[in-house]
Each structure stands twice: as C-alpha cells, then as structure tokens.
Amino acid sequence: MSAAPAVVLVGPMGVGKSTVGRLLADRLGVAYRDTDDDIVAAEGRTVAEIFVDEGEPAFRAIEKRAVARALAGHDGVLALGGGAILDPDTRALLDGLRVVYLSMDVESAVRRTGLNAARPLLAVNPRKQWRELMEARRHLYEEVATAVVATDGRDPEEVARAVLDALELKEA
C-alpha cells in the first residue's frame, strides 16, 4: 500500500488525538492508527519505559521510523505522538498531506492529562514543562498543519466535526 493517510493528527500530549482520531476514522469509514501504539507493539514496552531505559534521543529514532512506516502504509486517520514533528525529515514527509494540528491551552492540558508523571517529559514541574514544550513545538505544529482546530471547551465529537469542516471532508 502506498496511499497517503486521509488525515494526520498532530498536537501536544493529551489534546485528544487518539479519541478524535477514532471518531474521525469512524465518520470517514477508514481505519485508525496511532504511531505511539505502533511503537509500543513493536518494542514490547511503553513509551515512558523507552524514555527511561534508553533516553529521548533513542525514542525519537524509533518514533521517526514508526512514523515513516505509518505514513507510507496507512490510508486512514493517523495520529502522531506529540514530539514526532520535532524531526525535520518527518516534517518533510507531512508536506502535502492533510495535517490537522489539534491545539489546547495549558488549563485544558491540566484538566485532560492532570500533567502526570506517566508522561515522561512532564515528570518535574509539569505545568512549566508543558508551557516550555509548547513554546518549542507550537511553530512546528503550525508549520506542518493544513488546518488548526482548537479543542478548548469542545468535546471530542465537536472537535471531530470541526476537523471535518476545516478539511471540507464528508462523512462516509
């Protein structure tokens, strides 16, 4: 299979990429795939365990390969891990695809994730860490995005509808 994904979702951890992605896939009548799930299945351990055992650079290398495979072999809705867009080669692969940046503010992040230690990049001073991550990544999310959909104050169904509207896609 060499078809491109119908929609690629990017955005910070906890924004709802997985939940919204499944809803979109259902509405579009296509399969859903999450590169973090691919990594966990291939590596036999969680993303957090990979970070702890091998460090962020090793995880990013694994992630880069997983994203490239998914982009080349999945024609449904694809959700990327929050940091996948850090890699310039990954950003280049996203060029020309329907990429939606799901955005949220820090208060929404606190409510949705609790900014807990199970998320390795937020283990110390999670609110400050989240803000710093977003300062470093926001422009990259915007760079790759075809559309930006704010999730603040919206439930997943409303976000899925906003994504379909932003991309002018019809439900199956």
Image (cartoon, helix red, strand yellow):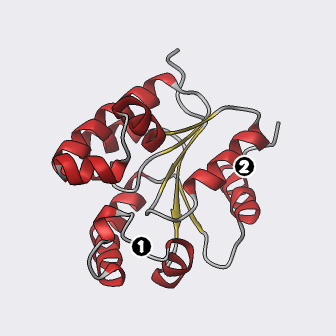
Instruction: Give the residue at x 25% y 45%.
Output: 60
* Residue 127 image point, x, y percent: 36, 83
Compute the Cα span from label 2 to label 1.
25 Å
Query: Which is more toward the observer, 16 or 144?
Result: 16
Q: State the residue lying farthest toward the right.
A: 172
Q: Earlier in the sequence, mark 2 or mark 1?
A: 2
Answer with the quarter of the image where residue 155 lies.
bottom right
In the rendered structure, which amino acid carries the disc numbered 2?
Leu
In the rendered structure, which amino acid carries the disc numbered 1?
Asn
* Residue 166 image point, x, y percent: 66, 56
For label 2, the SS is helix
Q: Is residue 59 left or right of residue 106?
A: left
Query: Which is more toward the observer, 109 or 8?
Result: 109
* Residue 98 image point, x, y percent: 54, 43
* Residue 71 image point, x, y percent: 45, 31
Dot 1 corresponds to which residue?
116
